[in-house]
Amino acid sequence: MTQTNTPRDLLSAGIALLLAVMVLAHAAPLRAAPGAWRDSATGFAIGGYDPVAYYINKVPTPGREGVEHRWGGAVWKFTNSGNRDAFAKHPEIYAPGFAGYDAHALAKGFTVQGLPVVWAMYRRRVYLFHDGASLQQWRRDREKITAAARANWPGLAKELPGASQR
């Protein structure tokens, strides 16, 4: 089946590319060993949600069947081809921080998968959280907790599924 690009897809691609350039200019390197956690039932990264949609739509948005891209040992789903193409060009920008693992848990020294619907944007990076309580605790001192998570991440990431695939 051939997929055609609609004007909306092209606009989304243009916006996504502009965001990618802006974020890339200010982004710290992604310190993820795996590309992201994968749903155990479907195998899709971050539960099949579109990672670019957080930047474009400002809400978690499930990806569509057939609009996919393989990166970091997982298949990622997207709402449209423009988002997929933007991600393919700059996955390090659009993949969630800490490969989608809960930053609050990482700061405490353990890994817990974040839920795609419990999220926050901080310094132009999307972070996922296991639950609302974890997100609220992180919001109280996001600078300190994110720094602690960043310090713990390299050691914890080595033990995660898919760590050897990058």
Image (cartoon, rainbow, N blue to C red):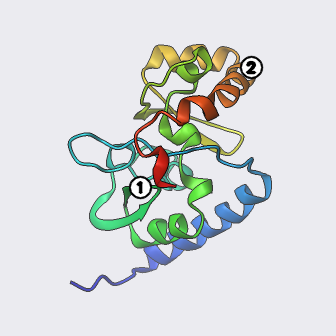
Asked if 86 appears above or below 57 in the picture, the reply is below
- Location of residue 122 (image quadrant): top right
In the displayed structure image, the side of residue 146 where residue 70 appears, left or right: left
- Residue drawn at (33%, 56%), measured in percent from left and top? 63
Residue 20 at x, y percent in the picture:
65, 62
Quadrant assignment, res 126:
top right
Q: Tag 2: Cα neighbours inside 10 Å, few (<14), some, or many (≥20)?
A: few
Alpha carbon separation for disc pair 1 and 2: 30 Å
Kindly identify the residue that appears in the image at 43 percent across and 24 percent down.
130
Which quadrant would the N terminus be assigned to in this image? bottom left
Q: Nearer the viewer, residue 19 or 100?
A: 100
What's the residue at 57%, 38% (across, down)?
98
Query: Which residue position holds label 2?
Result: 144
Q: Which residue is mark 1?
A: 73
Q: Where is residue 28 shown, x and y percent of the image? A: 74, 47
Question: Which amino acid, by three-letter code, is at mark 2?
Answer: Lys
| 61 to 115, vertically: above or below | below
The location of residue 50, given as percent across then percent down, is 41, 53
User: Observer-nearest residue: 149 or 139?
Assistant: 149
User: Label 2's element?
Assistant: helix
Q: Residues within 10 Å of mark 1 (few under 14, many from 20)?
A: many
